[in-house]
Amino acid sequence: MSIVELTEFLIKNLVKEPEMVSVKQLADENGESVIQVLVDSEDMGAVIGRKGNIAKAIRTLVQASAYSTNQKRVRIDIDSF
């Protein structure tokens, strides 16, 4: 399972509108992978969590998966539309 598939799986299982979730992998100028997550504005609270705990957990799981496949650091940007 790729880090994009893992991220999409985790996010879709948290939100009320899973069909509105968009996950894309990009690269920044440093060669670091950036995963862009877009969710419905009403689902932002479910993805971020109280004090950002859910977002931190998602980032930890995805980073651990990336390290296990010898990838560089991964950054996850979560936004709504």
Image: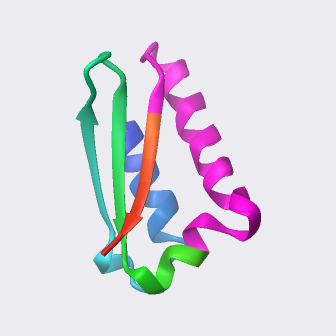
x%, y% of residue 43? 49, 80
Can you say whether 80 is above or below 27 in the image? below
Q: Nearer the viewer, residue 24 or 30?
A: 30
- From the viewer's perspective, tell me whether residue 71 is left or right of residue 53: left
Locate the C terminus and report the quarter of the image it occupies: bottom left
Magenta stretch holds residue 72: yes
The secondary structure that most of the magenta stretch takes on is helix
Q: Nearer the viewer, residue 77 or 63?
A: 77
x%, y% of residue 24? 26, 49
In the picture as drawn, the residue positioned furthest to the front comes out as 29
Magenta stretch holds residue 57: yes
Displayed quadrant of residue 25:
top left
Residue at 59%, 75% (x, y): give it.
46
Q: Nearer the viewer, residue 2 or 53?
A: 53
Can you say whether 43 is above or below 76 in the image? below
Residue at 35%, 36% (x, y): give it.
34
Displayed quadrant of residue 9:
bottom left
- From the viewer's perspective, tell me whether residue 69 is left or right of residue 22: right
Here the colouring is rainbow
Displayed quadrant of residue 2:
top left
Can you say whether 29 is above or below 20 in the image? above
x%, y% of residue 32? 36, 22
x%, y% of residue 15? 50, 78
* Total numbered circles: 0
The range drawn in magenta is 46-74
Locate the N terminus and report the quarter of the image it occupies: top left
Residue at 33%, 70% (x, y): give it.
21
Residue at 37%, 80% (x, y): give it.
40
